Image (cartoon, rainbow, N blue to C red):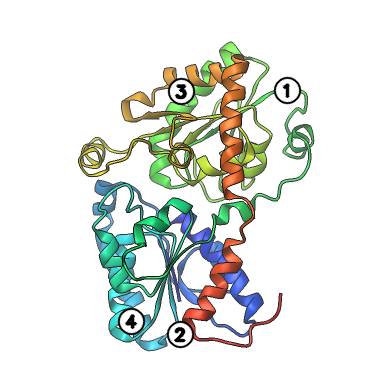
Amino acid sequence: MISAGEASGELYGALLGREVKKLWPDAEIFGIGGARMEKEGISLIAPISQVVGIIEALRHIGEVRGVLKKASEALKTEKPDVLVLIDYPDFNLALAKRAKAAGVPVLYYVSPQVWAWRRGRVKKIAALADRMAVLFPFEVEYYKDTGMPCEFVGHPITETMNIRGTKEELKKALGLEPDKRVVTLLPGSRPDEIERHQAVLEKVAEKIHMEFPDVQTVVPVTAESRLKGRLPDFIRVIRGRTSEAVACSDASAVASGTATLETALSGTPMVVFYKVSPLSFRIAKMVIKVKFISLVNILSGREVVRELIQEEASPDKIFSELRKILKDMQYRNDMISGLNKIRELMSGKEPSRRVARMVGETAGWDNAVTV
């Protein structure tokens, strides 16, 4: 059973399911996820969440409780050999408690951000989970004294970035003009992120069009994302091909999240921005204790890319940073150098393959197919 709480976790669940099926073709997998997991032959008992932020989550509390009830019933009736939890800590820790009561071993894949807030959860997680697979090397340290086995497996986003071709070839494949520069504006994947960020990015696009009329402005979104209204003609929307769009762009404005790491791995200079509801932001400031919010800066331990949060995430400031990336070659090259170090840090791993083997080890399976 796999419990993936949101879009990025659902992708990791799909990749994991694929690798489990390669090793154990007769394995039956079910859980909470989305279309990508379903495509890999995983039976869904409930859909993933599409909300972020404390206040936003409270509005959907009834829905979350309903999903938890379904998942708890599935633990009892299906009695899986192992439960894999992917991030989404408040929900998944509640589910882990029920799994423990049902005698189902738990593998936690993608640690909650204990390094950012509520560090005391480490002990609770260790008490409920049998093993932990983390995406970043520095996370292992947080579980060192808990007695729970914890392993750095790498980030599964690296497995989705098999991009081939020059920037010109990628532009042509996307229907863009290969001899003109590209700026990508990434609003996020969740509906509430798009709702908060779309208007800001439209104004950024307008400023780009006014000052750099030959630059192609692209908004890459998932196939399911819904943008509001009719966008101006100078904005090109590309669906389902975010990796290619970012890889061929000269600069990018990226909503904070996994997309910042994907952009870093492509070597594309960026500015990171984010907005939540005012109340969620005030609460977050009280409880979250980190110097940076983007994975790029967290992994680097310094400001490699500029972060513009809440009121700072204005069209003027986002555009100003994009202009600097496009015009100041020293600034641009220094940023690319920092991004290349992130790529080196995350290379050489096969996260989904390794976690699939951890699934088998935790479940007590043997006779895996040799791959």
Q: Earlier in the sequence, mark 4 or mark 1?
A: 4
Q: Is residue 233 left or right of residue 109?
A: right
Q: What residue does disc 3 label?
A: 318
Q: Earlier in the sequence, mark 1 or mark 3?
A: 1
Q: Nearer the viewer, residue 352 or 48?
A: 352
Q: Amino acid at mark 2?
A: Asp
Q: Earlier in the sequence, mark 2 or mark 4?
A: 4
> Where residue 73 is drawn, which disc sits there?
4
- Circles 4 and 1 in contact, beta carbons < 8 Å: no
Q: What residue does disc 1 label?
A: 180
- Circles 3 and 4 in contact, beta carbons < 8 Å: no
Q: Nearer the viewer, mark 3 or mark 4?
A: 3
Q: Earlier in the sequence, mark 3 or mark 4?
A: 4
Say which quarter of the image contains residue 74.
bottom left
Callout 4: few (<14), some (14-19), or many (20+) C-alpha neighbours within 10 Å? few
Q: What separation in Å lies between label 2 and label 4 (alpha carbons)? A: 15 Å
> Where residue 81 is drawn, which disc sits there?
2
- Element type at mark 3: helix
Q: What separation in Å lies between label 2 and label 1 (alpha carbons)? A: 53 Å
Residue drawn at 52 percent across, 65 percent down: 13
Q: What separation in Å lies between label 1 and label 3 (alpha carbons)? A: 21 Å
